[in-house]
Image (tube, rainbow, N blue to C red):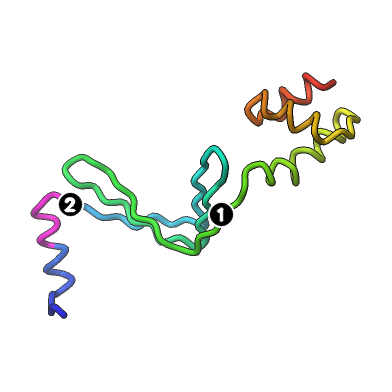
Amino acid sequence: MFNLDPKKIQSMMKQMGIKQENIPAERVIIEQEEKNIIIENPSIIKVNMQGQEQFQISGDIKEESREEKIKEDDIKMIQEKTGIKDKNKIIQKLKENNGDIAQTILDLS
């Protein structure tokens, strides 16, 4: 569409006080209350414009329920450490402790 020279664009951005930096990463996780957004193989560009930093992230996106992750990993460990087999009791205590596994183990021991 436009025949713009990339070097010219970089020069213009520098004159306007805009700096770009590529950030190497294997994955990005955005933690939300109900779920996590996971971006695998991300391309991350950090843009600094007049002292304000912004990140532009693209990649392979998937969502993961936070409660499922607790069930898979943490419940088994808590069961092993406390001897309690009731998953509902463990999930309830984890929620009370905001996902703090160590505190949950202490409370249930």
Taking 71 as reference, is 60 left or right? Answer: left
- Residue 12 lies in the magenta stretch: yes
Quick check: 92 above or below 42? Answer: above
Q: Position of residue 97 (x, y in %)?
A: 66, 24
Q: CA distance from mark 2 to mark 1?
A: 32 Å
Q: State the image quarter where residue 33 is shown.
A: top right
Relative to 79, say whether 73 is above or below: below
Q: Is residue 89 left or right of residue 13?
A: right
Q: Is residue 91 left or right of residue 26?
A: right
User: Residue 19, image x and y in percent?
Assistant: 21, 52
**Image mark for residue 16:** none
Q: Nearer the viewer, residue 44 or 1?
A: 1
At 11% across and 68% down in the image, what residue appears?
A: 8
Residue 23 vs 100, above or below: the answer is: below
Q: Which type of secondary structure does the marked residue at label 1 adopt?
A: strand
Looking at the picture, which amino acid does disc 2 mark? Ile
Amino acid at circle 1: Glu
- Residue where numbered disc 2 is placed: 18
* Residue drawn at (57%, 41%) of the image: 34
Q: Quadrant of the N terminus?
A: bottom left
Task: Name the residue beneath numbered marker 1.
Answer: 63
